[in-house]
Structures are given as structure tokens and as C-alpha cells.
């Protein structure tokens, strides 16, 4: 397995390799290397256990790349807002870079990382991100009015599910990253600037 960030380990935990990666997983890593020029450290971190790696990759790919009325940029914006609320260095770096890439706007990527409310967002995006922020910071305070605000902004109930699913996934990912001191690949810092 090609460690993408040779200068420092992907995480602070020393986990024993439990089983070899499958051919499918090796091919996935090769595709990442080809398309991104690196294997994201989050994948390297999960690679100690091929079952966990596959579960993570499948869920990530479904939520972030699968069928949804939410655009890929909107899903990445949710990832950044949740990660901002949680102050997740790994995800802010990685997904901030993706927001810069998908939007073609380095300034938007930086605003999203530092303070998403400073970004020039349309009403629909603002409603979506306000919901993701509240779901992250005060999940017990979510009420029907919060869902209705999303409907009023043009989101369907299925869209609300997708917003919540992306926010939930990144809340989990942020906590794993914090617990393991996951470090972003150096290459993320220079992308789309």
C-alpha cells in the first residue's frame, strides 16, 4: 500500500493490519492515486481492516457521489460546515479543497472553512447549511419548523434525508479523525488555489 503522506503517519494510532486488502480495494487505491495523485489518508487509516474500509468507502461514495437532488458541491459544502462546527482539521482541509475545486472559487472554499455565513450563498444553500450546522451543534433542538424551513427553501423530504445523512456521516467521520489525530495529505493544502 502506498502511504500518501510519507512525512508523517496518517493517524496517531498504531493499528495492526488485520487482513490484506481485496483486489477491489487495491484497484480503488490505484484509481485514487491515478485521479487524485494520492490515496487520501482517511482511506489509509481505515485500511487496517478491509471490512471497515469497504463499509466506509461504500457509505462515502453513496452519500457524496450517488444519486441525489443535492449537487456534489452542495454535499461538499455540508461536509465543510459540519467539519467547521466540529473543528475537524482533516475534513476541513480535504473538503475545503474539494469545495474550491468544484466551485472554481478559492475564496468560497476559504470562507466555507472559516465562517460559512461570510460566503455569498443563495437562500437555498443558506437554509441547507443552517440545518446542517444546527443538526451538528444542537441535534436535540431540531423541530418540524427546521424541516419546514428546508421545504420552504425548495427541498423535498428526500433532500432533507440526504442533508441529514451527509451531516451525520461527517459528524461520525470528524469524531474518528479527532480520536485518531488523522492528518490530511499534504497535497490537499495546495489544491485549487
Image (tube, grey):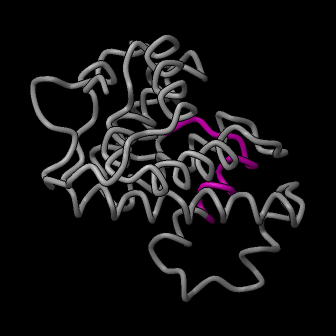
Specify whether 91 is left or right of 78: left
Percent coordinates x, y for residue 142 in the rendering: 63, 82
Residue 127 magenta:
yes
Magenta span of residues: 119-131
Q: Quadrant of the C terminus?
A: top left
Q: Residue at the spot x=46%, y=16% of the render?
A: 36
- Residue 22: % across, % down: 50, 38
Q: Nearer the viewer, residue 45 or 143?
A: 45
* Residue 174 coordinates in the image, percent (x, y): 37, 58
The answer to whether residue 22 is above or below residue 158 is above
Quadrant occupied by the N terminus: top left
Our reading of the magenta stretch's main secondary structure is helix
User: Looking at the image, which is closer to me, 166 or 125?
Assistant: 166
Per the image, is 187 magenta?
no
Tell me if 2 is positioned left or right of 70 in this view: left
Vertical position of residue 53 compared to residue 112: above or below: below
Please tell me which residue is depicted at 39% across the width and 34% down the height of the picture: 94
Going 82% across and 57% down the picture, which residue do you hit? Answer: 153
Residue 92 versus residue 114: which sits nearer the camera? 92
Image side of residue 101 versus residue 43, left or right? right
Residue 157 is situated, as x and y percent measured from the top left of the image, at 87, 67
Residue 188 occupies which quadrant of the picture? Answer: top left
Amino acid at each position: 500500500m502506498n502511504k500518501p503522506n510519507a512525512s508523517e503517519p496518517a493517524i496517531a494510532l498504531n493499528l495492526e493490519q488485520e487482513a490484506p486488502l481485496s483486489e477491489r480495494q487495491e484497484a480503488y487505491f490505484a484509481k485514487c492515486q491515478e485521479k487524485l495523485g494520492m490515496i487520501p489518508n482517511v482511506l489509509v487509516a481505515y485500511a487496517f481492516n478491509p471490512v471497515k474500509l469497504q463499509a466506509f468507502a461504500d457509505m462515502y461514495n453513496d452519500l457524496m457521489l450517488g444519486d441525489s437532488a443535492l449537487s456534489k458541491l452542495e454535499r461538499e459544502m455540508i461536509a465543510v460546515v459540519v467539519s467547521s462546527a466540529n473543528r475537524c482539521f482533516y475534513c476541513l482541509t480535504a473538503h475545503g479543497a474539494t469545495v474550491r475545486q468544484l466551485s472554481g472559487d478559492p475564496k468560497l472554499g476559504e470562507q466555507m472553512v472559516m465562517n460559512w455565513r461570510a460566503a455569498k450563498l443563495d437562500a437555498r444553500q443558506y437554509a441547507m447549511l443552517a440545518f446542517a450546522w444546527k443538526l451538528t451543534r444542537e441535534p436535540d433542538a431540531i423541530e418540524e419548523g427546521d424541516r419546514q424551513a428546508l421545504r420552504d427553501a425548495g427541498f423535498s423530504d428526500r433532500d432533507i434525508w440526504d442533508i441529514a445523512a451527509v451531516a451525520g456521516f461527517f459528524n461520525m467521520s470528524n469524531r474518528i479523525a479527532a480520536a485518531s489525530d488523522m492528518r490530511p495529505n499534504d497535497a490537499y493544502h495546495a489544491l485549487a488555489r
